[in-house]
Image (tube, rainbow, N blue to C red):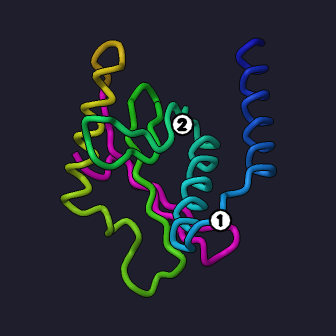
Amino acid sequence: MPRRLTQLAARALDRAAKAVLRPPDEPAHLRTGRKGEEEAYFWLRKRGYTIVARNWRSPRRKGEADLIAWNDGVLCIVEVKTRSTREVKPAEAAVDEEKKEELRGMAREYVRHVAGNPKVRFDVVSVYVDVEPPEITLFKNAFA
């Protein structure tokens, strides 16, 4: 019973945050990225991911991990790629070798603060905001 109440409360807070919070004035490409991350966050939550960090940064590394979550006992480092059009290349193609190495380093930093030795997985979420509702695709275990 307490777990069910916690889940209901979390969902209510998620809906309230989505309805009330508005992004600050910022350039269009940053708004697009933020919208994609928001959409991915709620989409993953509905699919059983427990999000434990958003836009996580380490003082020892450059960059950030868009989302860090637990899914079926696995710690997931989730990179969200958002596009407003499909004209150039697929969103997920933007996760190049440099980005993968950055995410691997972020994962090592994050795991240092987690008890035990959890299994880690790298997921990529592509979000296209040119349609309503946005089209979201999850690439589980996108790279090692």
- Where 104 falls versus 1 (above or below)? below
Q: Which residue is mark 2?
A: 49
- Where 95 falls versus 116 (above or below)? below
Spatial CA span between label 2 and label 1: 30 Å
Question: Which x, y percent locates residue 112?
Answer: 28, 22
**For the residue labelled by badge 1, is the local secondary structure a helix, a strand or a loop?**
loop
* Residue sitting at x 64%, y 47%: 42
**For the residue labelled by badge 2, is the local secondary structure a helix, a strand or a loop?**
loop
Query: Is residue 140 a member of the stretch shown in magenta?
Result: yes
Q: What amino acid is labelled 1 in the image?
A: Asp
Q: Specify whether 30 is left or right of 97.
A: right
Q: Specify whether 55 is left or right of 18.
A: left
Q: Which residues are magenta?
A: 119-144
Quadrant in which the N terminus appears = top right
Majority secondary structure of magenta residues: strand
Q: Residues within 10 Å of mark 2 (few under 14, many from 20)?
A: many
Name which quarter of the figure residue 22 lies in.
bottom right
In the foreground, 21 or 69: 21
Q: Which residue is mark 1?
A: 25
Quadrant in which the C terminus appears = top left
Name which quarter of the figure residue 99 lies in.
bottom left
Question: Which x, y percent locates residue 106?
Answer: 29, 39
In the foreground, 75 or 55: 55
Mark 2 or mark 1: whose residue is earlier in sequence: 1
* Residue sitting at x 73%, y 40%: 14
Query: Is residue 48 a member of the stretch shown in magenta?
Result: no
* Residue sitting at x 60%, y 71%: 129
Give the residue furthest to the bottom: 87
How many numbered discs, if any? Answer: 2
* Residue sitting at x 72%, y 30%: 10
Q: Residues within 10 Å of mark 1 (few under 14, many from 20)?
A: few
Mark 2 or 1: the one toward you? 1
